[in-house]
Image: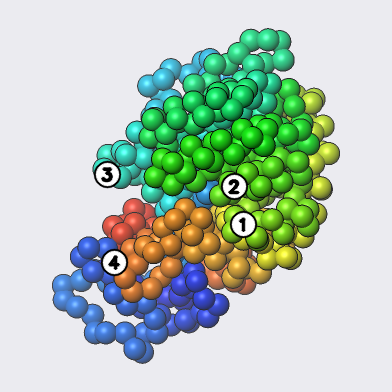
């Protein structure tokens, strides 16, 4: 495949190639990515695509999704009123929609069985390359406890409750047995959970350390922590997690610790910027969101200014599926330069997921996971937010979406 007449952003550097060509071989690896003037002559036969002056980017990442969770109805409705077969088909539709929005790789942090990852890898369904935690570990009454205020439990099979060191070790082992690529824990309460608050610490320090140890012993699996308030953020980093999810209460101490430990912040700003209709949610959730929104924006803006390692995640499932790249607009609004936001969603996210040697950058030898945008995201990052502006998506050189006008 040869793509020409494009502006190229490679996802790693700061330079833009205004008139560029990218070529990939039959195995889907990039053989050339650079100025058209230096490009090799087109091989025959090879499919040549005219990019019409659009911007070619590496395939983008969403490091915090819930693809098994519907974003257009409540958890209660999805858990109690959806036929399981229909639920599976709805998940496959969300996978395809997410891919076509420009997300070629995703990390799912609760609600997606490992079988979906394997089905995508086998070509049975189309979707982003997947890593999944399968479930979430929390304590009784914590963020992942699906017990409703009235006492009835949703019995969400991906939520594991554990209340001591032995319990969290066993819960981690169950997740790993189920095929988890990483372990997801809750070290703080949450905005969307009924029985706690983001300022509350969820798992205790010794429990966090036990999960990190279990994951390490299982082929060095990483741990991601739902951590919204300051106490949960600090406990997570000190306990050795790879990534802090949300991090709304992060402060200078938390930023320093992330830098010292080589960890990552995944701020899921889409959930912060998404308005919440008080007529369509509970009073307690609405009040918590109001109390935390500005706090979160201020703290994440400071983390951006301090150049903390930030990877991109959206909390899709809580936020709408298929609008994932709105997250980059949120980062830019809080002070991140557009080029840095693109790198956060490509090469930085690839490092977080441990795939930086094959994905996240448009350079020879890397897999040809590509996104072509009709517009210039460095001038207006918002062009990436609209799926109709994503006119080409490829994974390892295989076209998954192409809506360029006219012949190509």
Q: Name the residue under label 4.
A: 29
Of the residues under marks 4 and 2, which one precedes in the sequence?
4
Residue 314 in view of the camera:
no
Q: Do the residues labelled 4 and 2 touch (CB within 8 Å)?
A: no
Residue 207 is tagged as none
Quarter of the view holding residue 283: top right
Quarter of the view holding residue 211: top right
Residue 261 is tagged as 1
Residue 236 coordinates in the image, percent (x, y): 65, 43
Quarter of the view holding residue 89: top left
Q: Is mark 2 on a helix, strand or loop?
A: loop
CA–CA distance in space, label 1 to label 2:
8 Å
CA–CA distance in space, label 2 to label 3:
35 Å
Of the residues under marks 1 and 2, which one precedes in the sequence?
2
Residue 384 coordinates in the image, percent (x, y): 55, 59
Q: Mark 3 points at which residue?
A: 123
Nearer to us: label 1 or label 4: 1
Of the residues under marks 1 and 3, which one precedes in the sequence?
3
Nearer to us: label 2 or label 3: 2
Residue 240 is tagged as 2
Dot 3 crowding, Cα within 10 Å, few <14, some 14–19, many 20+: few
Q: In this view, does 195 lie above or below 153?
A: below
Q: Is mark 4 on a helix, strand or loop?
A: loop
CA–CA distance in space, label 4 to label 3:
18 Å
Dot 2 crowding, Cα within 10 Å, few <14, some 14–19, many 20+: many
Q: Do the residues labelled 1 and 2 touch (CB within 8 Å)?
A: yes
Instruction: Give the residue displayed 32% in from the left and 77% down from the top.
Output: 32
Q: Is residue 359 left or right of residue 149?
A: left
């Amino acid at each position: 495949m040869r793509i020409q007449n494009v502006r190229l952003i490679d996802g790693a550097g700061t330079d833009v190639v205004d008139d560029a060509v990218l070529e990939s071989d039959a195995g889907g690896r990039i053989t050339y990515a650079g100025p058209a003037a230096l490009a090799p002559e087109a091989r025959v036969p090879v499919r040549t695509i005219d990019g019409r002056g659009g911007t070619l980017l590496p395939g983008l990442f969403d490091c915090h999704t819930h693809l098994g969770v519907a974003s257009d109805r409540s958890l209660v409705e999805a858990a109690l009123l959806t036929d399981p077969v229909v639920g599976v088909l709805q998940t496959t539709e969300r996978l395809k929609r997410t891919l076509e929005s420009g997300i070629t790789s995703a990390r799912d942090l609760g609600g997606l069985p490992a079988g979906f990852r394997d089905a995508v890898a086998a070509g049975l369904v189309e979707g982003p390359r997947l890593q999944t935690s399968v479930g979430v570990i929390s304590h009784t009454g914590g963020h992942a406890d699906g017990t409703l205020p009235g006492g009835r439990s949703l019995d969400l099979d991906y939520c594991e409750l554990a209340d001591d060191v032995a319990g969290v070790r066993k819960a981690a082992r169950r997740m790993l047995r189920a095929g988890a690529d990483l372990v997801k824990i809750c070290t703080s309460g949450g905005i969307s959970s009924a029985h706690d608050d983001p300022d509350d610490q969820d798992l205790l320090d010794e429990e966090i350390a036990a999960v990190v140890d279990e994951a390490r012993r299982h082929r060095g699996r990483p741990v991601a922590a739902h951590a919204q308030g300051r106490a949960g953020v600090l406990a997570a980093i000190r306990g050795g997690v790879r990534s802090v999810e949300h991090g709304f209460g992060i402060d200078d101490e938390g930023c320093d610790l992330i830098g010292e430990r080589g960890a990552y912040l995944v701020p899921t700003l889409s959930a912060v910027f998404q308005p919440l209709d008080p007529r369509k949610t509970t009073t307690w959730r609405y009040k918590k969101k109001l109390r935390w929104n500005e706090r979160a924006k201020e703290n994440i803006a400071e983390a951006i200014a301090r150049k903390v390692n930030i990877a991109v995640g959206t909390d899709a499932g809580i936020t709408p599926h298929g609008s994932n790249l709105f997250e980059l607009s949120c980062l830019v609004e809080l002070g991140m330069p557009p080029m840095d936001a693109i790198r956060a969603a490509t090469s930085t996210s690839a490092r977080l997921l441990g795939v930086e040697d094959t994905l996240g950058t448009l350079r020879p030898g890397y897999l040809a996971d590509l996104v072509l945008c009709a517009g210039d995201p460095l001038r207006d990052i918002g062009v990436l937010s609209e799926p109709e502006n994503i006119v080409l998506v490829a994974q390892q050189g295989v076209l998954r979406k192409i809506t360029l006008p006219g012949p190509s």
